[in-house]
Image (tube, helix red, strand yellow):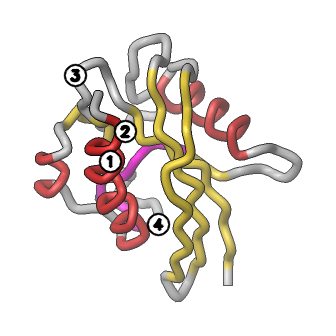
């Protein structure tokens, strides 16, 4: 089985909208929506990997980040460990540099999109975070 450690960002803009991106159809869990991020390479910290991935995929530079949730999920053919952080005060304008569609959505609108099963704990943690954060 393939084990993958992934740094994930729940990116919030000034209106508290959250950035989601759509996985390429030919990718694992293709066609579903996700929170941006990518694989933590050997020797990288989660924070460094998240900064690198968001710069490469979206063209943004991290500002304030904070841990949100750690998710471990077994898909059968792949086991993932999602190290999820909230991202605020980034610089640059997010765009799909790898051709991936992206959307800024409210917390309430997240329910309208299909996400991989591993993202369900993230979807549960976001409203709790937003209520505690009061921004």
Front label number (3 vs 4): 3
Closer to the camera, 58 or 127? 127
Above or below, 113 relative to 92: below
Looking at the rendering, the stretch of residues picked out in magenta corresponds to 29-37
Q: Residue 44: which disc?
A: none
Residues marked 2 and 1 touching at CB (< 8 Å): yes
Label 2, label 3: how far apart the Cα atoms are: 23 Å
Q: Secondary structure at mark 3?
A: loop
Q: Look at 59% across and 77% down and name the residue there.
A: 79
Q: Position of residue 133 (x, y in %)?
A: 35, 37
Question: Mark 4 or mark 2, which is nearer the start of the sequence?
Answer: 4
Provide the residue designation for mark 1.
22
| Left or right: 67, with 25 as reference point | right
Q: Is residue 51 left or right of residue 121?
A: right
Mark 3 → mark 4, Cα distance in angstroms: 31 Å
In x, y percent, where is residue 97? 46, 27
Report how far apart the C-alphas of labels 3 and 1 lie in the structure.
21 Å
87 over 119 or under it: above or below: above
Residue shown at 46% from the left, 17% from the top: 89
Q: CA distance from mark 4 to mark 1?
A: 12 Å
């Amino acid at each position: 089985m393939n084990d993958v450690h992934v740094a994930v960002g729940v990116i919030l803009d000034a209106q508290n909208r959250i950035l989601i991106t759509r996985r390429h159809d030919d990718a694992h869990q293709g066609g579903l929506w996700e929170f941006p991020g990518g694989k933590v390479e050997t020797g990288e910290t989660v924070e460094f990997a998240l900064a690198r991935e968001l710069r490469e995929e979206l063209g943004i530079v991290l500002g304030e980040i904070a841990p949100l949730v750690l998710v471990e999920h077994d898909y059968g053919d792949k086991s993932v460990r999602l190290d999820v952080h909230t991202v605020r005060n980034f610089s640059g304008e997010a765009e799909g540099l790898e051709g991936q569609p992206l959307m800024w959505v409210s917390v309430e609108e997240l329910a309208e999109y299909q996400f991989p099963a591993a993202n369900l704990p993230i979807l549960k943690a976001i409203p709790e975070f937003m209520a505690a954060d009061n921004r």
